[in-house]
């Protein structure tokens, strides 16, 4: 009698999709952080065995850096879409905050906030590459928000952009800490009233 093995097959599955695997890894890192996520947990999240993960992405750190790059590119696309809408100041800020809060309230099993704010800020203390990616992300965020504000007619866009970014970061932390939607919406509304 031949017994079936419950071990995962060797190699990548035929349906391997690198973007889907990165998205799954991002959710696991976003929930548990870089240090708190094991290779076995990443294999479970992505559906890939450990050798396949190494083959596709390199080690855990390389996979984490790839997740940060993917998140950076995704955020840039979100800012681009918002710019293309050419909204006035208040509706632009309302749309931006709504989308950000919607994202922050998602997660594998609870709201997990932003992978950069929630996990890269911690990992950056000991890893210069993560620190560089975090600095690049924050600079992009400041620049894109400033451009959105200026295009929407805010004469103090340069001063307001880092304030908006700081509120965005606070929303991530508060979502991760379990703040209800109403609290996050109220903080965003107060920020909009200060600027618009």
Image (tube, rainbow, N blue to C red):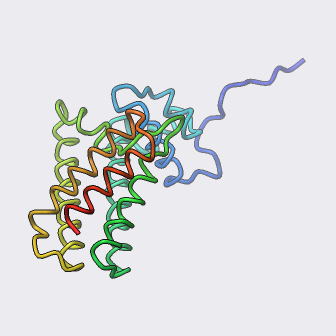
Q: Is residue 16 left or right of residue 193?
A: right
Q: Is residue 11 left or right of residue 193?
A: right
Q: Residue 147: x, y in percent?
A: 19, 73
- Residue at (46% x, 48% y) in the render: 22
Position of residue 79 relative to residue 164, above or below, is below
Q: Quadrant of residue 160?
A: bottom left
Quadrant where the image shows the C terminus: bottom left
Q: Residue 36: x, y in percent?
A: 38, 25
Position of residue 3 relative to residue 19, above or below, is above
Q: Residue 12: x, y in percent?
A: 58, 44
Position of residue 64 relative to residue 41, above or below, is below
Q: Residue 187: x, y in percent?
A: 31, 50
Q: Is residue 82 left or right of residue 192?
A: right
User: Please, which residue is most extreme toward the top here?
Assistant: 1
| Front-most of residues 13 and 191 | 191
Quadrant where the image shows the N terminus: top right
Numbered label tally: 0
| Front-most of residues 94 and 6 | 94
| Front-most of residues 4 and 147 | 147
Q: Quadrant of residue 58?
A: top left
- Residue at (27% x, 62% y) in the render: 192
- Residue at (53% x, 33% y) in the render: 43
Q: Quadrant of residue 122?
A: top left
- Residue at (39% x, 52% y) in the render: 185
Q: Is residue 103 left or right of residue 126?
A: right
């Amino acid at each position: 009698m031949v017994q079936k093995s419950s071990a995962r097959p060797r190699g990548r599955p035929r349906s391997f999709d690198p973007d889907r695997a990165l998205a799954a890894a991002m959710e696991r890192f976003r929930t548990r952080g870089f240090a708190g996520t094991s290779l076995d947990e990443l294999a479970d999240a992505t559906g890939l065995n450990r050798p396949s993960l190494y083959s596709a992405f390199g080690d855990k750190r390389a996979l984490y850096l790839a997740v940060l790059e993917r998140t950076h590119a995704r955020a840039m696309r979100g800012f681009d879409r918002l710019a293309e809408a050419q909204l006035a100041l208040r509706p632009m800020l309302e749309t931006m905050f709504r989308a950000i809060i919607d994202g922050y309230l998602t997660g594998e099993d609870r709201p997990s906030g932003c992978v950069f704010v929630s996990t890269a800020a911690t990992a950056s203390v000991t890893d210069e590459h993560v620190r560089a990616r975090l600095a690049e992300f924050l600079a992009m965020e400041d620049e894109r928000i400033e451009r959105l504000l200026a295009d929407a007619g805010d004469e103090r866009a340069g001063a307001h952009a880092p304030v908006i970014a700081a509120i965005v970061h606070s929303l991530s932390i508060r979502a991760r800490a379990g703040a209800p939607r109403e609290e996050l919406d109220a903080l965003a509304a107060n920020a909009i009233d200060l600027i618009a």
